[in-house]
Amino acid sequence: MAEGHTQVIAATPVREVDRDAAEGLAATPAIDARDLTKRYGKVEAVRGIKLEVRPREIFGLIGPDGAGKTSTFQILAGVMEATSGVANIFGSPAREMRSQTGYLTQSFSLYPDLTVAENIRYCGDLRRISPQQIVARGQQYLRMFDMDRFADRLAGKLSGGMRQKLSLICALVPQPRILLLDEPTTGVDPVSRREFWDALAHLSADGLTILVATPYLDEAERCHRIAFMHQGQILQIGSSTELCASLNAKRIELRTPDLRKTESILASHSGPDDDILDVQRFGDRLDLLVRDPDQAQQQVTEELTRAGVSIEEMHVDQPTLENTFVARLRALGQDLHSSEFPSRHNHSSLRGQIAIDAKSLLKDFDGFTAVKNVSLQIRNGEVYGLLGANGAGKTTTIRMLCGLLEPTGGSMELAGATGNLRSEAVRKRIGYMSQKFSLYDDLSIRQNLDFFAGVYGVPDAEREEKIRWVLSFSGLEGKQDQLTGSLPGGWKQRVAFGAAILHEPDILFLDEPTSGVDPLARRAFWTMINRLADTGAAILVTTHYLEEAEQCNRLGMMVAGELVAEGTPSGIKSRQTGHLLQLIVDQPQRAVDLLKHTTEGWRVSLFGERLHLITEDAPEIAIQQTTQQLEAAGLRVFSAREDRFSLEDVFISIVEKARLEGKVSLEK
Amino acid sequence: MRRILAQSRKELTQIVRDWRTLALALALPLVMLLLMSAALSLTVYDLPIIVQDFDGSSASNHFIDVFRASITFHVIAWPVDKPAEAALASNAARAVLIIPPHFGRDQASGVNSPVQLIVDASDANTAKLVSGDALQIANAYNQQIAAPAPVQAAFRLWFNPGLSSKKFYGPGVFVLALSMFPPLLAGLAMARESEQKTILQVYVSSISAHEFLLGKIFAFMVVALGEAVVMSAFLFTYFGLTFAGDPTPVFVATILYTFCVASFGTMIGVKIPNQTAAMQVVALGGFLLVFLLSGLMFPVQNIPIGLRWISNFVWGRYFIEIVRDALLQGGGWPAVWYKVIFIGIIGSIFYLLAWNGMRKMQVKS
C-alpha cells in the first residue's frame, strides 16, 4: 500500500480539461451564490447566503448539524430549486451547468445491486460519455484508488471507504469542472480519509474546483478557504489561518495525569471575560484558549497546584480550526445544555466485574474469515475502544460480543451468561447502538422513544423523565412530534444514542456513535459515555475520530479481522518506535508529495496544515535532512520540531505496516 | 436514444441481479394458471342430491333413474320420514327432489305431475347450474315418455363447446398475471430510487424525464413480454389452446399492454416514493381492478350499474376481450380494433402522469 501511495501520484491522470481555458475563466467565479434562500414550508434552511468560490479552489463548508449545508449543495448541484436568489456555476444558472458538476451526496447515491463497473458505466452513460472513454477513465481511476481488484464486486458489499471512493470515481468519469462533496468522509476510517484528501489535492491542482462539507475539522484545514455556516447563514469566510486568527486568542496545550479533573477545575474559571476563554478536551490533552498566554499559564499553574494536580506538559501554540469552531459555537449558545441524566439504577456494585469475556472468537462467512482469534475482556466501569479501518471486522466483532451473531469458533461470556446470550435477562442488561440508525424514520421522535422505552421495559414511572432527558440531550425540546426521517443525520445520531441508554444498561455497545455528528455534540456524547462508565457500566465503543479514542480506558486495534494491538492509549503510543517530526511549510501538499517519493508513504501525513513525518533516525538529523530536502525543492520551512505521537499517527502506521506485511485482505 | 438504452440496461441488470424476485414473477403466473384452472370449475359434477319418493311406483323409480344416470348428480338415499331440510342443513346434500304420492297415477292418466326440487342456494352460482341441469333432466324424461313436442330447442355451445374452465380461465389468468407482476416490479424499482436517494444522481445528470422514464418502462416491458411468452407456451401446450383466427391483433395488443402496465407501475412509483405504499397501490390497481371489474371473473353485465362505468377505464378489460377473441372467437381486427386503441390511450395517460411527476427532474421540496 505504501507503493500504492506513490502510485497515486504517478497515476494521476492528465485531465482533459483545458488548463488555459480554465485559467481564462479565472475572472468568472466557479461558484457564485447570492442572496440564496431555501424554505421548506415554514422552516428556512438557507437564509440569504453569499458565496464565491474561485476556479481550482478547495472550498470548505463547515457548520453544526442542520446548518443548511445539504440544502446549499442540492441547489448548487441543480437538483433542487432555490426559493429565491442566484446560484451560478461559471456564470450560468446551476441547473443548466449540471454537465459541469459532479455531486457526491451524503448517502453516495450508488446502486447497491450493481457492480462497481456497472455503477461507473451507468453514470457515464447518463452523461453521454462514449463507452470507450467510460472504460478507459473508469479503469484509470480504479487503479488510482487501488480498487481495480473490485470492479466486479457489488457496490452494496463494499466497505464505507470503498463506497466513498466509488462514488467519487462515478462523479469524476464525466470529467466535471466542479465537484460538490457533501460530507464525503463521514463514517470513513482515517487511512481512507487521508488517501481521499490526497486525491482531492491532486484533482484541484489539475484544475478542478471543489466545494466540500465535512464534520472533520482537521480535514477542513486542508481547504484553501472555509465558510462557517450556522442556521442557514454564512457567518465567516476565510482561510483556516484567518478564521483561527479571528478568535484573537492563543492556545495552551496542557497535559496532566487526570484530564477530567483538570478540565472541570479549569472550566469553572473560564468564560468570555476571564483569562481562559475556553477549555476543550482534545485527545490526551486539554486545549485552553487564552488571551494572554503568560498570565493564563500562571493562573493554570496556581489552580492546579492548589488542587494537587501535577502538570506534565504545557506549551503555547496557535489555535486549531477545531478550537475555533467549538469556541464559536459555544459563543453562539450552541452548547448542549442537557438536563442531568435521570439515573435510577446504580451499577457501581458491579464495578470491576468482568462484563464481556471473549476468547478466540472466530467468524467465517462462506469461506471468508471476517474475524480471527479475537480475545478481549471488558470490565464494568471501563470504556473500551475498538479501532480499525473500514472492513477490519469491528462491526462483526461487536455483533458477536452482544450475542446477535453466533461465532464460528471461540467462547463468549456476556453479563455472566455463557449459553443463551439472547435471554431476556441478558438483553435487559445490554444496550446496542448500531452503525446504521436504528430509529424508525416514519415515526415521530416521541413515538420512537416511546417504542424503545417500551421494548426495553423502562418502568412507566421513569419513562417520562427519561424521554424528556433524551429530547434535552438531543437539543430537540419542543420538536418531539417531528418525523425522525426529516432530521439531519447528526441529530438522528443523538436521538439514537439517547434511545440506546434509556434503560440504563450496564453493558453498552456503541458502533460509531459520533459518526457525522458535529464537534460540539461529539463532546457531549463523550461526557455522557464517561458518566455512564463512572456509574459502573461497561462500554465498548468504535470510532473513526481517534482523538476521541484517547478518552477510552483501553483500546484494541483491529486489522484484517485480527486484534493487532491492545492497551491503554498511552501504552499503545509508547510502543510506537521512531520519532515524530512536525513541520510547518508553505506548501504542505507539495511537501507531502515530495517526501513520499523518498520515504515510505505511511510515514508522511498531513494534519490540517501540519505535516507529520515518522522517522527512525535521530530527530535532530532527520529535521536537518528533511529541511534541506524541502528547501532544495523551493519550499519554505517555517518550523520543524519533534512532537508526541498522536493516536492517529500510531493507528495509521499500525494499519499500513500490517498491510505491508501482506494483510491486504481488508475486504472480503 | 443512447441514454434510454443505458437506463434500460441498468434496470435489466438490477432485475436479473434480483433473480429471486424475477423467478417469482415468472413462476407465480404459472402456479396461478394451474390453480385457477384446477380449482375453478364452470360445470358441476357429482353433486349430492337426496330423493324422497312418496310414490314408490315404477314410474317414479324410472324418473329417479334418469337423475342417477346424470353426471351432475349423485343420488343419496334418504328415508321418507326424515325431514329433507336436515339433509341440506347438515350439508349431506345440496339439493332435494321430492316426488309426490300420486306421481305414477298422474303419469298413467296423462295429467301433469309436479315434482319439487329444493336447492341449497347459499352458493348462487352452483344453485343456478343445479336447477338448470335438473330442468334439463326432467325435460329429457318428458321426451322419453311422451310424443315428441312439436318444437324442440337444440342447444349448441360455440367457442368453448366442452364448457372447459381451462379455456375460459386460461386467457383470464394470462391477463391477470400481466396486470400484476410487471407493474409491481416497475413500481418497486421506481420507489426504490427515491427511497435510496439514487435518484439524486439521475437528477444531477442532464438526462430528460422522457429518456429516464422510457428507459425504465422499456426494461419492464421486456420483463412483461418474457412473462407473456412463458405463459403462452403453457397455454398452447398444457391448456391446449390455439389461435381461433388472425393472431396479429393480440400481438399488437400484448405489446401495447406491456407498455400500459409498465407505465402504470412506474407512475405509481413516481407519485409514491415509498416501496411499501407503492406496492400496495399497484396491487390494488393491478389486481383488484383487473380481477373484479374487467369481466375476467364476473361478466361486466353483472356489475351493478353504479360501478359498471369504471370498467370502461380498466385497462385489463380491453385486453381480456382481445385475448379471448384471439383464442376463442377469432373475430380478428374488425371485432377488436378499437379495444387495441383504448389500451394504447390508457397506457399513454399513465405515461404522461408519470412524466408530469418527474418533469422537473428536481428534488421536491
Image (cartoon, rainbow, N blue to C red):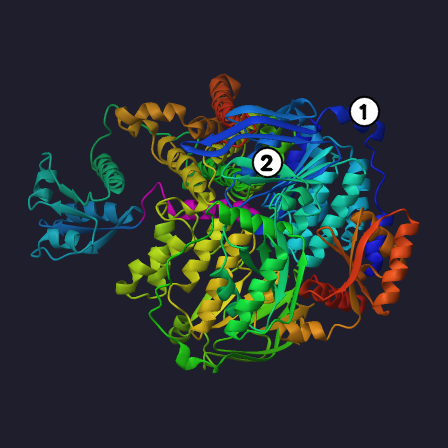
- What secondary structure is marked by label 2? helix
Span of residues in magenta: B22-45
Q: Of the residues tagged 2 and 1, which is closer to the observer?
A: 1
- What secondary structure is marked by label 1? helix
Is A579 a magenta residue?
no
Q: Residue at x 75, y 24 (%)?
A: A27
- Gap between marks 2 and 1 measured at Cα: 26 Å
Q: Which residue is mark 1?
A: A24
Q: Residue at x 48, y 25 (%)?
A: B353
Disc assigned to residue A620: none
- Callout 2: residue from which chain? A
Amino acid type, callout 2: Phe
Q: Main secondary structure of the magenta part?
A: helix
Q: Does residue A566 appear anywhere in the picture?
A: yes
Is B33 a magenta residue?
yes
> Which of the 4 image quadrants contains residue A450?
bottom left
Q: Which residue is mark 2?
A: A73
Give the total of numbered labels: 2
x and y, in percent, of residue B258 in the image: 54, 31
Pointers 2 and 1 in contact (CB under 8 A)?
Answer: no
Q: In the displayed structure, does residue B320 sit left or right of residue B69?
A: right
Amino acid type, callout 1: Gly
In the depicted structure, whether residue B162 falls above or below residue A636? above
Question: Which quarter of the image is occupied by the C terminus of chain A?
Answer: bottom right
